[in-house]
Amino acid sequence: MVALDDGVRTLRKRDSRACPDLFASFPTLNHEEYFVGPSPSGRRTTQGQVSKMPNIKIFSGSSHPELAQAIVDRLGMNLGKVVTKKFSNLESCVEIGESVRGEDVYIIQSGCGEVNDNLMELLIMINACKIASASRVTAVIPCFPYARQDKKMIPSLQDKSRAPISAKLIANMLSVSGADHIITMDLHASQIQGFFDIPVDNLFAEPAEVKWIKENIPEWRNSIIVSPDAGGAKRVTAIADRLNVEFALIHKERKKANEVASMVLVGDVRDKIAILVDDMADTCGTIVLAAEKLMDAGALKVFAILTHGIFSGPAISRIEAACFDAVAVTNTIPQEKHMKESSKIQVIDVSMMFAEAVRRTHNGESVSYLFSNVPY
């Protein structure tokens, strides 16, 4: 009597003849197709329309609407209606333009641009959805704000005993606002996940970066993967192992924030293609000095691959004047303006990784596949 159709338990027209008493108790129902429960796969609705992912709403903040649009395009969905604006006193205001009651809500907002305003906007959006009875609210934060302030050892402060741990504060703010889950990419320090009492999925850009290397550097088999600091050693060894090439690292000492005092190369890069890999570049002082160090040590060419390209201050002019053949950066932060200013900057699209993470999270599937593979 009960037939399974595309994961939906339905009662067919023939069943209404077999069980007239059942349908008599539901006089307003269409006997053609009665849905007993929601479809786990979401392939069909009562109107016969196709809906790949039911009970899900995706909203975009104002920090990176291009990435949000790319994510929903890959999921075959539309962005939810939301209006973000500022009052005359510069307070942020958010209006959610559609019902989210009982929905699985995803809010995409990167920690870039006007970081403080965008962070406040995200917190307000999360809270607005939560008090509107959303069943779950997930914050998709491609570039996590304040990630570099993850410990008290801040170089620019003389007395480190009074340094803030701002990344922990951001974690608390997200939790208190009502976030149930966080999806981000390449946290500056993976320990930041421990600042949260809610689940955090820290995706890796590594699979997309390995794919870019193989497709854009013909001599990649003669390459060496280089970390511009000791903290990135684990990242470069993982990429070097996947490519079956050697790795090196540069030990740096800072006098103060955004200023490197000295650099020491550990490893042999002579007659090799050097590929600098880092999670973040701000003013680009580190990677430019590292590139010079590599060329002085005999490298044939130097490439840089970055996850989060902030490129503030003199960053673009430094890249243009440096000896890079190319600087590849993911689109966790908008790069259209930077690409116009420098022909060396190329973008690695990671929208498919976030789209797949959203799909798997919504369907209750594991996201560990994304730690070592690029979804197509």
Image: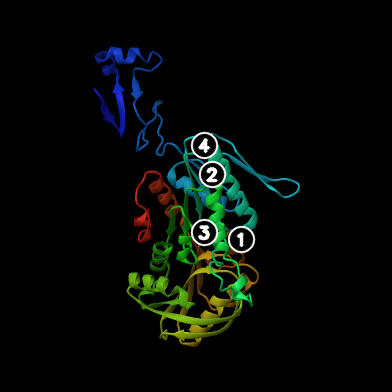
Give percent across and percent down for residue 196.
Answer: 48, 56
Is label 1 or label 4 in front? 4
The residue at which mark 4 appears reads as 133
Q: In terms of secondary structure, where does tag 4 sit?
A: loop
Q: Earlier in the sequence, mark 1 or mark 4?
A: 4
The residue at which mark 2 appears reads as 59
Q: Is residue 357 left or right of residue 86?
A: left
State the CA–CA distance, disc 1 to disc 4.
38 Å
State the CA–CA distance, disc 3 to disc 2.
18 Å
Position of the N terminus by quadrant: top left
Q: Earlier in the sequence, mark 4 or mark 3?
A: 4
As shown in the figure, which amino acid type bears the numbered disc 1? Lys
Give percent across and percent down for residue 238.
Answer: 37, 70
Q: Earlier in the sequence, mark 2 or mark 4?
A: 2
As shown in the figure, which amino acid type bears the numbered disc 3? Asn
- On the question of residue 334 being in view, the answer is no
State the CA–CA distance, disc 1 to disc 2.
24 Å
Disc marking residue 225: none
Residue at the right extreme, as displayed? 88
Q: In terms of secondary structure, where does tag 3 sit?
A: loop
Q: Earlier in the sequence, mark 1 or mark 3?
A: 3
